[in-house]
Image: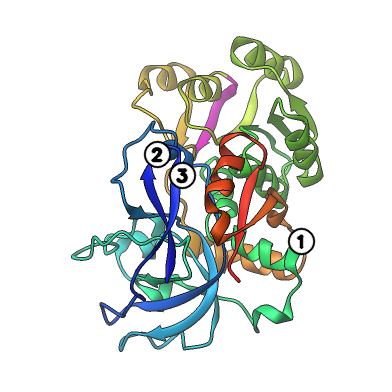
Amino acid sequence: MKAATFVAPGKIELKEYQHPKIKNSTDAIIRVIRTCVCGSDLWWYRGINKRNYNTPVGHEALGIVESVGDKVNKIKVGDFVIAPFTHGCGHCVSCLTGFDGNCLNNGVNDSEVIGYQSEYFRFKNANWALVKIPGKPQDYEDAQLNDFLALSDVMATGFHAAKSAEVKENDTVVVIGDGAVGLCGVLSAKLLKAKRIIVMSKHHDRQKLAQEFGATDVVPERGEDGINKIKELTGYGSDAVLECVGTAQSIDTAIKIGRPGTIVGRVGVPQKDILSGNNLFWQNLGIRGGIASVTTYDREILLDAVLKGIIHPGKVFTKTFSLNQIQQAYEAMDQRQAIKSLVVIE
């Protein structure tokens, strides 16, 4: 079977692998029908973060269950599923308290690198972590399939920013970042009934989609100019801040635009350790966030919201590729030709 493989910074190749097999009794084998490129993939693609060469890549997928391990009884062969990147077990303290992104049993005694940008892959902790979708793929239109795929990571991550920031009805919310996660943060703030949603974005196509998702204001300025603009718009600072980038500048901005008592929901993958707790102390600010609780959020609210047509996060996929075009899919993301690259498996 074919799988996208990281060869070197800037270079992804499709390579042949053996068909995956059940390794643990809690596994499932998934036949992929759609996958995608994540903004976090660009860190190692650009050589900013290190990744071992010649390893399979990708961590977001929609697919059909091909086989299951002996201990998998809630998912069966033929089920149509969202495959989150988190692989929560469902019974450790992290999963039970709603933090399946930090599952204590994910990867224990099983460190194999799994790549979702492939024809098939092995999914760990399948019994709880997989999210079953009613019916079959042919029951849904392409746009709906894209919405489901977004629930494997990007929509849940945007929602994690909003939940971590404790967005409430009638809040004024600032979203830092206009990538797919930031745009899903806008959608999440709207879902949680924020009254005013200010997106910090300087790209016209992304501003337009942010407004479609519920943004009421757009701030293209960055740095001190952006901070001053937010204070001018709000008068006192934001009730909640969603930090969806991970750079030093975005963290600095997030801390400076909140009013006293604000919580920053931080989901931008950090490039380096840059946070000073002193600023949080003097401004009475909080900061929370991290790896999204994908299965928890999908089951609690997001899958139902997609099925009812309340949200359409799949609109962040603005270019479509085949698996054979995986290099072009990465290039489109890297060069900002696509907000998020969709990969359809034939």
Segment tinted magenta in the rendering: 257-266
258 drawn magenta: yes
Under tag 1, what secondary structure? loop
Q: Badge 3: how crowded within 10 Å, few (<14), some, or many (20+)?
A: some
Compute the Cα span from label 2 to label 3. 6 Å
Report the amino acid beneath label 1: Ile
Which residue position is annotated with label 3? 41
Quadrant including the C terminus:
bottom right
Rendered view: 292 above or below 270: below
The front one of 172 and 29 is: 29
> What residue do we see at 36% from left, 76% from top?
19
First in sequence: mark 3 or mark 1? 3
Report the amino acid beneath label 3: Asp
> What residue do we see at 52% from left, 34% from top?
263
The front one of 281 and 71 is: 71
> Is 111 placed left or right of 201 in the picture?
left
Rendered view: 132 above or below 251: below
